[in-house]
Structure formats: C-alpha cells, structure tokens
Amino acid sequence: MKVAVVGCTHAGTAAVSNIASLYPEAEVTVYERNDNVSFLSCGIALYVGGVVKDPKGLFYSSPEQLENMGVTMKMKHEVLSIDSDQKTIKVKNLETGEQLEDEFDKLVMATGSWPVVPPIQGIDLDNILLSKNYNQANKIIERAENAERVTVIGAGYIGVELVESFQKYGKEVTLIDGEDRILSKYLDPEFTDVIEDDFKTKGIDLALNETVTRFEGTEGKVTKVYTNKGEYSADLVILCVGFRPNTELVKGQVDMLDNGAIIVDEYMRTSNKDIFAAGDSCAIKYNPTGEHAYIPLATNAVRMGTLVGRNIMKPTIKYMGTQGTSGLHLFDHSMASTGLTEKAAVLAGMNVKTITIKENNRPEFMPDYEVITLKVVYEEESRRIVGAQVISKADVTQSMNTLSVCIQNNMTVDDLGFVDFFFQPHFNKPWNFLNQAGLQAVQ
Ligand SMILES: Cc1cc2nc3c(=O)[nH]c(=O)nc-3n(C[C@H](O)[C@H](O)[C@H](O)COP(=O)(O)OP(=O)(O)OC[C@H]3O[C@@H](n4cnc5c(N)ncnc54)[C@H](O)[C@@H]3O)c2cc1C
C-alpha cells in the first residue's frame, strides 16, 4: 500500500506518525515544501515577544524522527498537481528544480491553509509581512528589531497576540480592523470591551471600523497605511486577516465548501474514497450548529490527522466534531470561549438566551480572589448549551473545556446547575461558577 502525504505540519505529522506505527508495512512518502515539520505557529507571538528564547522548542517532531519510523521524507518538495483518476502526483524538488511523478494507493491532503493577502495597492512593499510559518516568524523578528511603529492588520486572535508582544517589546502599535470590535468572532462585546480597555491603557492605538485602502512606501519599504478614515505611519506591517484552505491541487476532484475547504466525513474520507484530508485544508463538523464549518485550529488538525492514521485502511474511529474551543492570555487577563457567541448564534438564525454571571473565583475569606465573568449561550426551546465565554485575571480558562464537553454531549443549561464539581477554597467556591450559571438560568 503506497500512501502519499502532502504537507507535514500538524495534520500531516499526526497522520504520518499514526500510519507508520499502526501499519509499518505501508510505504509512506511525505512531500513537504518547507524544510521543517510540526512548527507551532501559536508560539510566534511568544517568540517575537522574547518569552520563547529558543525556537527549537516550537517543533515537536522532525524529518529525521519520521524517517526513523520508516517514512520517506521528501522535504523541500512541492506537489504541483494531483490526478485522482490515475492516482498520480507531480512533484518539484525545490532545491534542484527537478520534477518527478509518483503513484499512490491512498492520498492524504494535509496542505493546511495560507494567510489571505488582499489585493490592496502597495501590498508588495517590503516590511509588509505574514505570520504563519517558521521562516516568516524569523523575518518578523529580524525586521522588528529596527522598527519603531508597527501596524497589525486584523484583530483576530493572531493579530491581538502580536499586538501585545510588540507593545511589550516597546514598539508603538496600531491595530486596524474592519469590524467595530477586536476578537469579534470569539467573544461578545462585554468581553472584548475589557480587552480593548486594557489595550488603550497600554497605549495601543485601536483603529476599529476602518478598512485599509492602500500602503505607501519609500525606497520600496512601507512607511504609511491608509484606511477609509485615516493614515498611520508604520515601518513594519503584519497582515493577519484570515486564512484560506490550500486545496487548489484537488479542486474539482473532491467535494468542498464554497471557500475551498475539503468536506470530509467522520472517518476523514473525502468524496473520493482513496483521498483523505485533515487539518486546515478541511471543513469540519461544528457541533453547535450541526453544519460543516471552517475552523482552522491546531487542535482540530492533530485530532483529524490522528484519525486519518486510524481510518486509512478501514473505518475505525469516528470524529466527534468540534466546538472550536480556544483560549487566550492578553496582558493581565485570561479568556476562553467554546461554541457560539450570542452574536454568532443570532447570525446563524438560532433562537438563543444567555446567562451572564460575575462571581469571585475563590471564597472571600482567602487572601486574594479575582472576579470571573462567565456567559453561557443556550437555545431557548431545547435549553441545549451552544456556547460559552469566560474572562478573569485568574486562570479559569479550563472551564471552557468543561463546557465544550457539555456542548459535545448536548447537555442543557439546567443540567449544568447540578453537575458534580469539586470544592476546595484554593481553587473555587462551594457552588462552582459553572453550577451558578446553570442555577441562575433555571431561575
Ligand atoms: C500565528 C498563529 C498562531 C496560532 N495559534 C494557535 C493556537 O494557539 N491554537 C490553535 O489551536 N491553533 C493555532 N493556530 C492555527 C494552527 O497553527 C493551524 O490550525 C495549524 O497549523 C493547521 O495545521 P495543518 O497541518 O492542517 O496545516 P498547516 O499548518 O497550514 O500546514 C500545511 C503544510 O502543508 C505544506 N504544503 C502546502 N501545500 C503544499 C504542496 N503543494 N506541496 C508540499 N507541501 C505543501 C505547507 O508547507 C505546510 O507545512 C495558529 C496559527 C497561526 C498562524
């Protein structure tokens, strides 16, 4: 059995290591256009901010490690085309320029995603950078050294993390976004207001509700960013306006969503039975709505890649779907969310109610305690929990993993009131704040 794997960051590494250990007789070949595997992009902001000193820690595998498992690693090899009828692929060796053809019995698409680069005038100027892979992380660090004014475009989780790092690095920072709030996909306004206040206190310039119209430069280097409402001086610009699945290679050969994300079934099979897919190249079942959605996260990528390995020879383990659970730490606040925000639920046409509580994380007799704000979103009729968000100066983000399990298992807000949670004054109160939310929703 010849298995060709295209792409080897998270989904690819998980798929390959599982296939190699479960089916040592399989002939697995990986084609990866980079010179590394398993780079953790989530460490870029920490690396830029100097928290991560040694970038080697941002990799958890290597081509050598996978080779030792019996996998043929074709690094710096780009797959140019795939013929799913003939079961062949054309590949270019990026070092020598040589082209080769290979055959496969099964193909794994782990080609991931690439940052969206909008066609804005001046976008090709030097020092307008992307933040996705290891080479780009190094370039950001190199260019940031001599930059005084940094503009980050896009206030999603990648943009806001970079903003925090640049501010801590002593740069003058502007954050531009077309939405009227930061993190608008992940948190409702009562949560984003808190972080926006923190950002303003730290001197970060928030240019929200503004769209970038053009860039201007001197001697080929960016110097200004123009929006529909103003202009901002910048010697470094980082574009973080979203991701697109990298799936051109199989366009028209497997079913996809409109944005090009490959649709897979619960065994990670595409509409072609010999082509599997995992990670950012895929759409995934989103449990709060029951629909396929594009949720590019490393967590989804490693789970899906692992399932490719388990299911490649025969359907074995089903994917449970996702809640898109994610967490963030910005300045003094830890926050996390799972499932739908109230805004997203309303946009999805759902009839929802919410319960928001403010509660101290520990009993007031303890020497210190912090306020927690928790919001739970649930369907009005069924009372099924469909989303939740939490923010506090204490780290209570794991509570969103708990609520992720609740959503996964179709629990109601009424169930939440009486779930068994432990109590110990170091950690929480006799009525856990999740119980409290459930109880108050019942009232
Ligand atoms: C700055 C940043 C921070 C992030 N933080 C988090 C976080 O905190 N938590 C979280 O869960 N997720 C986070 N993510 C998202 C996470 O990194 C992605 O979901 C994850 O990388 C997806 O893994 P993947 O293997 O599916 O795809 P990718 O990481 O996109 O990898 C795809 C691989 O395929 C290769 N490839 C593509 N086309 C070809 C071709 N034609 N030939 C050969 N090789 C090819 C690419 O070179 C690449 O190595 C972050 C992302 C970024 C950019």
Image: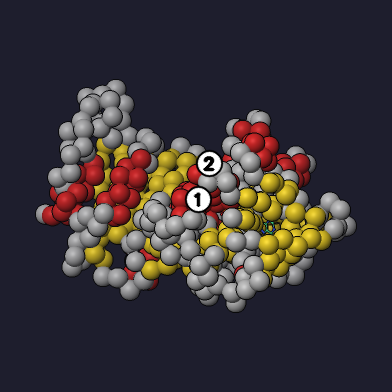
Per the image, the residue denoted by label 1 is: 309
Extreme residue in the top direction: 367
Q: Earlier in the sequence, mark 1 or mark 2?
A: 2
- Residue tagged by mark 2? 21
Q: Is residue 12 visible?
A: yes
Q: Measure the C-alpha gap from mark 1 to mark 2.
A: 9 Å
Query: Image point 44% across, 57% down: which residue?
Result: 314
The answer as to whether callout 2 falls within 8 Å of ligand 1 is no
114 or 183, nearer to the observer = 114
**Residue at image x 63%, y 41%?**
70
> Of all residues shown, which one is farthest toward the left?
443
| Quadrant where the N terminus is found in the figure | bottom right
The reply to whether the C-beta atoms of the residues labelled 1 and 2 are less than 8 Å apart is yes
* Image x and y of residue 298, in percent: 52, 49
Of the residues shown, which amino acid type is indicated by label 1? Gly
* Residue 153 lies in quadrant: bottom right
